[in-house]
Image: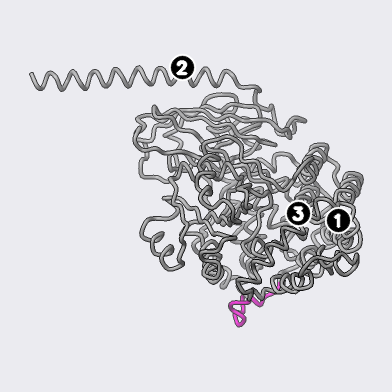
Amino acid sequence: MKKALTLLTLLTLAISLFAQEADHDAWLKSEVAKSKRQALPDFDSPDFFRRDTARLVGYIKGYDTESQEAGLIYAYNCLTRENNPVVITIHPDGRFEANVMMQYPTVQNTTCADRILNVYLEPGCTLGIVIDPDANPESRYYQNSELTFYGPVAEMNTALFSVGYEEYNWEEYENALKTYTPAQFAPIADALLEKNMAKLAAKKDQLSPKAYDFLSNDPVVAHAYLLLDFINSRFYQREQNPDNEALKADVPDNYYDFLTRLPLDKQVFFTSMDIGSFINRFEYNTKFSDLFHLIHSADARPEKTFFQFLIEDEGIEFKGGETWVEMQQKLIDGKLELTEEERKVFMKQGEEIREFSKANSALINKYKSIYMSNIENKTLKAWRLKDSAMIDDLKLQPNFISQTIKLRELDRLFKEINKDEATEILTMLNATYLKHPFLRSEAQRIFAQGYPEGDGMIFELGDTPAADLFREMIAPFKGKYIYVDFWDTYCAPCIAGIMDMKDAREQYKDSEDIVFVYITSTSGSPTSRYDKIVKEQGLEHSYRLSDIDFFRMRELFGFNGIPHYRAVNREGVVMKPNISAWALLGDEKNKK
């Protein structure tokens, strides 16, 4: 009788699972049928660049309802450097879904249920996926045998998993930097490219022209990134190993010839997941290094702060103003030796100057016209010089990538100049450099974000579970400035920043004006490592969130990389600029 009951139980369970899977299939097909768009016919389409939402839906067979897992699409707009991560909601029955704003078709860096699932998406299209994780349960990456795709871009995703490109061995990279000269390393990178292109050629008859075009691009971008990164990384290694002969070797004149063979004006170039990394290495490559320093050098800092301008040029008196200027200069110079009383005076004076600024916009414009007009002039000069270096040294004509590099500067630039100056920059940029209409529309959007109507310093949290959780965490500290640091124990820059702030945390311990809050995740900060750092660094207000909640924080504040910083004012309002702890302590944001 007991055996019969067991068989009956198993049969009932099997029927239940079969019925659930049938329901999931019906739901998946219904969602895929709602796709707003069909896939692009090819990558030369005039609709390649467009702002629209892509949708990802699917289900995981045999999902453990107690695992409480989630996923994240690390969405990144490499045209503008904007991070727009999106949480993949995994329901208790194993169904998952997410909507992500996109600007062009590309492979999205994605995790789902704690495993990597990089997928190709197109704006306006829905991708459906059925995951059978039992096929390769130990692998960190989902394999082709575990995945079935549905919808307009199913073919492209099936192709994405079909070739199996060989990746460069990054574990040996540091040794390669110390061992090979540029002339010796280039053939190694070339051989890897040839091997991967041979793998693709063997699959050509099985692929559509669009899929073949797409798959041809990825190893080319990876190869270009590798060669650029090798040269950039040598400079740091040379400082650490000044006697290393390989690092002393010059870069041959023909080293950069591979750039002339890249499809820099082809839209398909942007479909690679590595495109953002390539553009970063291209815009900061050694041929432009002197120009990079010209754009970002300290001499671009205004001769006087706004507060100094008011006191010294306009003769406006503030109680204790001269003392405040001296304290501010200490902070600028990195001499943070303020007493508790000095710090209170400084914070109070900062509030006074902030209120004065709101009521005197004409004086702000006057200050910027006198002391900040050089900033945009230097940027324009640097753009011209960069194009000259690109033409003369790299043998490249202005192209879509060189246009993109200028667009990527705008967010930073608009934080440093006033609206009238930014309007002139935008007009010149559209007339001289930005030829593509979509890049012009993105420039206009960044301009609107940089100079919003109303108070542009405030970040609107909105009404979401993540926003509610964040409000709950900061609620006990209302009335103080709150410095929020998102981190994890495996992030070296995060730990360095935490250690760097230790003296400041001790100095402001029990302060009535400022508090330090640290937020991490369970997987990013395992218990033993987390407890050790919290104890060593004296992190009094530290939160260790579930991975789901930390993903939601990333989505809320729009960050992929860490450390990531946020500032909250005395009223509990999140400020829009991402600022460092030193800037918050010095109220640096009010000088811009």
Circle 1 Cα neighbour tier, 10 Å, few/some/many (<14 / 14–19 / ≥20): some
Which residue carries the number 2 mark?
A: 26
Q: CA distance from mark 3 to mark 1?
A: 19 Å
Residue bearing mark 1: 364
Task: Find residue 336 and report its image quarter.
Answer: bottom right
Residue bounds of the magenta highlight: 239-250
Q: From what the image shows, is residue 32 above or below residue 425?
A: above
Looking at marks 1 and 2 on the same chain, the residue that comes earlier in the sequence is marked by 2
Q: Amino acid at mark 2?
A: Ala
Q: Residues within 10 Å of mark 3 (few under 14, many from 20)?
A: few
Residue drawn at x 88%, y 44% as measured from the top left: 430
State the residue position of label 3: 412
Task: Kindly check if marks 2 and 3 are in contact, taking CB atoms under 8 A apart as contact.
Answer: no
Q: Secondary structure at mark 1?
A: helix
- Does the magenta segment cover residue 281? no
Under circle 2, the secondary element is helix
Residue 186 makes an appearance in the image: no
Q: Which mark is residue 451?
A: none
- Residue 240 magenta-highlighted: yes
